DNA sequence: GATGTTATATAGCGGCCGCTATAAAACTGA
DNA sequence: TCAGTTTTATAGCGGCCGCTATATAACATC
C-alpha cells in the first residue's frame, strides 16, 4: 500500500548501537548515526523517533542480545555453580578483548542519572542480573556446590559489584591479569570447586 | 605590573568540577561553565586553556582532594585492617548520600577511552588505589589481622573491582541495602574481625 | 495508468557549540 | 601622568547540533 523501506531496520540498529557503545550517548551526533546506518535524517527520524528514542531501542536490543541472553544461556545449559563461573569468566574475557566495556554500564553512568526513562531500564536490568546471581547461588547451595558461608542475597550483591567493577576497569585499565584475577577471586568465594559435590 | 584577577581560581575550579561531576564531560558546555564560575569566556580560556585542559585540572584537583586524600588519611591514622574497613565503608556511605558517584569512575568510562591524556591519569590513579589495597592487606597479614587465604595482589584486585562496581551502582541504583551489603561482604573477605589479632 | 500512501533525498531551520577578536578597564612601575 | 601589562566585557566567529519542511520517488491498490 506504500513505498517499502530500503534499509534493514535491524542492521541500522546494530550500527547505531555500535556507535553509541563506542562513543557514548552525548558524544554521538545524529549526523554520525546517519553515516553509519546509511539513512538520511528523515528516514531515521521517521523510523525511530528522536535521538533518545533511538538510543532506548538500541539499549533494549543490546540488553536482550547480550547480558540477558547470556544469563539465559548460562542458566539453562549448566548447573548453577558452572553457570556462575561461565558467566563471570565470560565477562572477564570479553572485557579483555573489547575495551568498549558494557553498554549497560556505560549507560548507567552517563545517561541513567539524567534520563529517568533510561535510568529505570538500567536499574531493572541490573536487578535482573542480581537475581540471576541469587538464583544460581541458592540452587548451588541446595545441591552443595556453593558455599553456605553467605546468604544468596549477600553473594549476589558482592558478585554484582565485582562484575560492574570489571566493566569499569575494562574501559580504563584493560589489564588481563587484573581482570582475570578479580574474577578468579570472585569465583573462589563460591567455595570448593564444582568437582567436589553433585546431588 | 598588571591588572589582578577578580576571581578566586580555586572557587572557579570547584564550581566547574561540580558541574562536570554532575553532568559528565560532553554534556557540560563552556557556557554553563562560565555561568557557574561567574567568569566570562575570555577569562576562563585565559586562565585554564581550553575545555579539556580545564577538565584535566578539575580532575586532578578532585583526585587529590578525594580518593588520594582518603587513602592517605585512612592509611596514616589507622592500622591496615581498620584503614581498609574505613575506606570501603566510606565509599559505600558516600555512594548512598551522593548519587553523582565518583568523578574518577565516571571519567574512566566517558572520557578515558577517547582522550589518551586523561586516560593515562585515570589508569594511574586506579593503580594507586590498587596498591593502597595491596599495602594494607600485606601489612594486615603480617600483623595477623587479615586472612592469608589470598595473596595481597589478589585481594587488591578483588577489592578494586568491588569499589568500582559500587560507584556504578551508586549512580544507577542507589540502594542502601545493596551498597552496604556489598561492602560488608567485601570486608568479610578479609577474615576474622580486627578485634581478634594485634601484634 | 491513476490514486493514495509511505519512504527517501535535498536543503536548511533556529540554536547552541567551542572558541576568539577587539577594545575597554585595572593595576604596576617609571 | 603615562606607558606597559594583564584581565575583563561585549560581541560574534564558523561550524555543528537536533530536527524538519518540502518535494520527489517507489510501491500497493483500484
Image (tube, coloured by chain):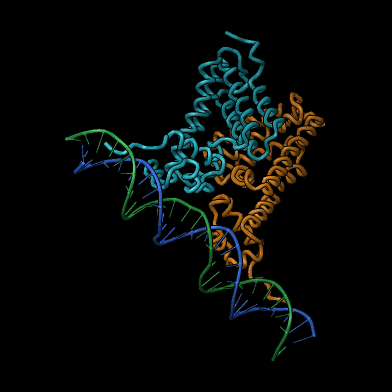
Chain colours: A cyan, B orange, C blue, D green
Residue A65 location in percent, x, y? 49, 29
Quadrant, the C terminus of chain B:
top right
Residue A117 location in percent, x, y? 43, 42
Locate residue A9: give its quadrant: top left
Quadrant, the N terminus of chain B:
bottom right
Residue A20 location in percent, x, y? 52, 41
On the picture, is A176 further left or further right than A137?
right
Total marks shown come to 0
Q: Residue at x 63, y 24 (%)?
A: A89
Locate residue A57: give its quadrant: top left
Q: Residue at x 77, y 44 (%)?
A: B76
On the picture, is A62 further left or further right than D1?
left
Residue B174 visible in image = no
Q: Residue at x 62, y 64 (%)?
A: B44
Q: Is residue B104 above or below residue B191?
A: below
Q: Nearer the viewer, residue B189 or A166?
A: A166
Q: Residue at x 53, y 41 (%)?
A: A19
Residue B130 visible in image = yes
Residue B189 location in percent, x, y? 68, 28
Locate residue A170: give its quadrant: top right
Q: Nearer the viewer, residue A46 or D26?
A: D26
Amino acid at each position: 500500500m506504500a513505498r517499502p523501506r530500503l534499509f534493514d531496520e535491524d542492521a541500522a540498529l546494530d550500527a547505531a548501537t555500535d556507535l553509541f557503545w563506542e562513543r557514548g550517548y552525548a558524544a554521538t551526533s545524529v549526523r554520525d548515526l546517519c553515516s553509519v546506518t546509511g539513512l538520511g535524517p528523515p528516514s531515521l527520524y521517521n523510523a525511530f523517533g528522536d535521538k533518545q528514542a533511538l538510543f532506548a531501542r538500541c539499549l533494549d536490543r543490546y540488553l536482550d542480545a547480550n547480558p540477558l541472553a547470556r544469563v539465559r544461556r548460562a542458566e539453562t545449559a549448566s548447573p548453577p555453580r558452572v553457570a556462575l563461573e561461565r558467566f563471570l569468566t565470560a565477562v572477564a574475557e570479553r572485557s579483555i578483548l573489547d575495551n568498549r566495556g558494557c553498554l549497560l554500564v556505560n549507560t548507567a553512568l552517563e545517561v541513567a542519572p539524567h534520563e529517568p526513562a533510561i535510568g529505570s531500564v538500567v536499574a531493572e536490568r541490573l536487578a535482573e542480573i542480581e537475581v540471576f546471581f541469587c538464583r544460581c547461588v541458592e540452587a548451588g547451595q541446595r545441591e552443595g556446590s556453593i558455599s553456605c558461608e553467605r546468604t544468596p542475597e549477600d553473594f549476589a550483591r558482592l558478585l554484582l559489584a565485582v562484575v560492574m567493577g570489571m566493566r569499569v576497569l575494562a574501559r580504563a585499565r584493560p589489564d588481563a591479569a587484573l581482570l582475570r584475577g578479580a574474577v578468579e577471586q570472585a569465583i573462589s568465594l563460591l567455595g570448593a570447586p564444582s568437582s567436589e559435590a553433585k546431588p
